[in-house]
Image (cartoon, rainbow, N blue to C red):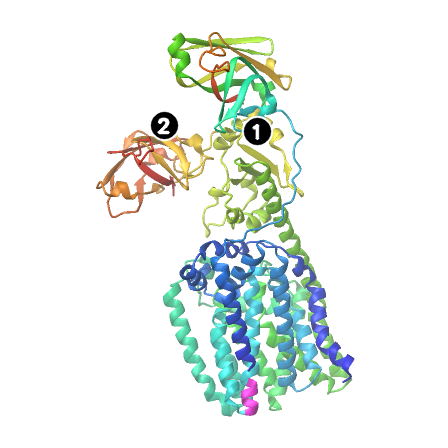
Amino acid sequence: VFSIRLGGLFLGALSLLFPSAACKPNHSVTLEPTIEEPDRPLAVLDMRDPKAARQLVRGFHRVEENSWRWTMGHFAVSLGTPPGASHNGASVVMKFSIPDALIERYKTITLSAQLDDKQLSPETYTRSGACEYRRDAPAALLEKDPVQVQFALDKYLAAGAIETRELGLVVASIALEPK
Amino acid sequence: MTKAARAAYWITPLAFCTILYWYGLKAWFLQDDFAWLGLQDEATNFASLLRTLFVPLAQGTIRPWSERAFFLIFSSLFGLHAFPFRLFVFLNQFLNLILVAILARKLIGAAPAGIAAPLLWLSNMALVIPMAWSAAYNEVQFATFFLAGIYLFVRYTETGDRKFYIAQWITFLFAFGSLELNVVYPAVVAVYSFACARRYFRSTLPLFAASIAYSAIHRMAAGPTQSYYYQTIIDPSILSTFGKYWAMLFGLTKPDDAGLSAWSATLLAALTIAIAGFVVQQARRQNFLPLVFLCWYLITLTPFLLISRHITTYYQAIPAIPMAMLGALALVTAWRSGWVWRIVTVGAISAYAVPSISAAAEGMQFYYARSQRIRHLIESVAYAEKLHPGKAILLRDIDDQLFWDGVRDSPFRLFGWTNVFVAPECRLQIHNDSHFEPLDKYFLPATPLLDLLKRDQIVVYSAEGTPLRNITRQYAENAFTHPAPEELAAQLDLGLPYLEVQLGEGWYRAEQEYRWMGRHAVLYLPGPDRAGQKLFLHGAFVDQQRSQGPLHLAVTIDGRPAQAHSIGPSQREFRFEYDLASDLIGKAKIEIGLTVDRTFRAGRDERELGALFKEAGLR
């Protein structure tokens, strides 16, 4: 009798398995807060990251398609210096697209940048599409944290040219990359 | 007995169990638990549920009730909250203690045996792991079947009522789903009936047929074990293995200890002589019950003597039951034999119980502390995952114990976290076991690590102390100012984004565990570290490709063409291996070029798709 009851118990337990088989797996776990580093300025501003917005100093329009932003003709960001930058230096890297309308209208555009007070060498683009602007930033310029990088286009689409906004580049990310 | 005395009689062992094994109630998961906790991901419908319950798993075991069902039910109800698991184990153990009490009282014929036997069993160190580690619950559950089966058989021999015999059969058959040790159960009842109820000896013989049939079916289903540690070894080393277990039974040594101290050896000899003397003396008086208990010990231990590469304390959880009954019988007998024997027996039992209880208490704290380190680690990583979505997580200060307890069984994969790695510098502190899979996949090599740091795609946490501490900034400062030599991963999971620094031209983004290449793609691996290592490629062949006929894959290894392979229309997956030239051994980086002879476009996707890969690497 005892054994039959025991068998019944196991059959009962087995029947409990059926809902579990149909259920979504349960991997719930308690969260234990970690000890985090003090919040500091980001060295990489990904336009998809809402936290990056506070370091867009000026010249950026709203984020679009959750991945990029239009800039104006002049725009600036504040960037945290990456680890090792005061020792090795770093690179200013901007990933962006040049809109067809800009190249069709002006044929060439030149992008110049300034890291705090230091002018970085400009670059001229002749084709629309995905581009990268990359310049070395010497260690001496990166001793303070954060630094400001100002960008300027020699030609851009003025407000009212094709829409009400002033339009420059389509930027995906701006970063100070460690070396 | 008064009502209060009767209550105390039954409650005392349960209270002792709760006090001694208290830390077991609070223990968390470790090691194999994580594999069992992942079972629920595999049981997605009725067919897969049956597969999950009955297909041989770890070391070819089939334990649907004690491992599969236990973990499936509790993890689906409670996730990774360990307390319900632990509570259930304790409740099952309470049932065992009651069964031990009933059985000891019945067999020995004295009420004090019903309290002494469970207390002596609880004092044994063999119960530490089953009471602390959910993956060892099978021992606790099987004890229920084992004790219930013997009890029913004894009742059958007392009453001749076949309902007990049938109930015993049902219990016996169910027990196969709990632990393979059940194959020796027929020998246990056969010995008992031969010594104490000879008339029923023949009724035990059909049980042997069931054990033989189970062994044959199990062997067919699971095949010979591939695990080094679980291979059967029949040679004279069985005797030394027995010696080890015998000393462990009395808490005089541990599995990893090299030998016995002089004091332990003397004590072991004294206890052995005392037990042998008691058994022989009783046998000469035609009382074979002590001999039966000793035989039960040997019978239930024998299967473990054959796997001498894996000696562990908890394998004696079941063999310790008859020895506890033997101890209870010795106490009862001594009590009836005057003060000298009382003092001698109490002295002998104390010599076993006092250090064993102390060691068991220490063992429980040790397991509890280990499990808590893992809990802190995983719960902190869970928090970090929420805090830094999309980034890789690097764990520093993972020591050997923490790695083997809480990282090696991939607990992070339970949550779908494929982004958690151990820092490469921890590798030196973690011992390698050549009988297990290589540990490479757990570590992030220096070159991809530096790449992720540069791209701000990784956060680094120190596991030194609890909770985890974010040390990304300090770690990155050191990594950039003192860069490590180039070190690439020898195995690339192409479905993950963390090793992309090892991908050259021609690859698209990772998608759902796979990654497409175009017509031509390049990847980088380290050179082989020994002769005989091969390059392997693993990928899939989708329907649209198969309908266009075979796809030819040409491979170059560091610029030299390797044997070309074709992926046939009948193949859904492909796995190719390539020899590696000996002059590549030790090179920091080799280039693998992959070219297919045609591409296609899928629907509106404008990409030119060549071949779909899952893994590439050396092995």
For the residue carrying disc 2, how many other residues have a C-alpha within 10 Å: few (<14), some (14-19), or many (20+)?
few
For the residue carrying disc 1, how many other residues have a C-alpha within 10 Å: few (<14), some (14-19), or many (20+)?
few
Percent of width and height locating residue B431: 53, 47
Asked if badges 2 and 1 are on one and the same chain, I answer no
Magenta stretch, main secondary structure, is helix
> Which of these two is toward me, B350 or B156?
B156
Magenta-colored stretch includes residue B15: no
Percent of width and height locating residue B536: 34, 41
> Label 2 to label 1, Cα distance in Å?
31 Å
- The answer to whether residue A164 is left or right of residue B123 is left
Amino acid type of the residue tagged 1 in the rendering: Pro
**Relative height, residue B550 to residue B257 (above, below):** above
Instruction: Kindly tell me whether residue A174 is visible in this rendering.
Output: yes
Query: Which residue is disc 1 drawn over?
Result: A50
Disc 1 is attached to a residue of which chain? A
Q: Which residues are magenta?
A: B154-159
Query: Which residue is disc 2 drawn over?
Result: B505
Q: Report the residue at 68% width, 57% height from top.
A: B365
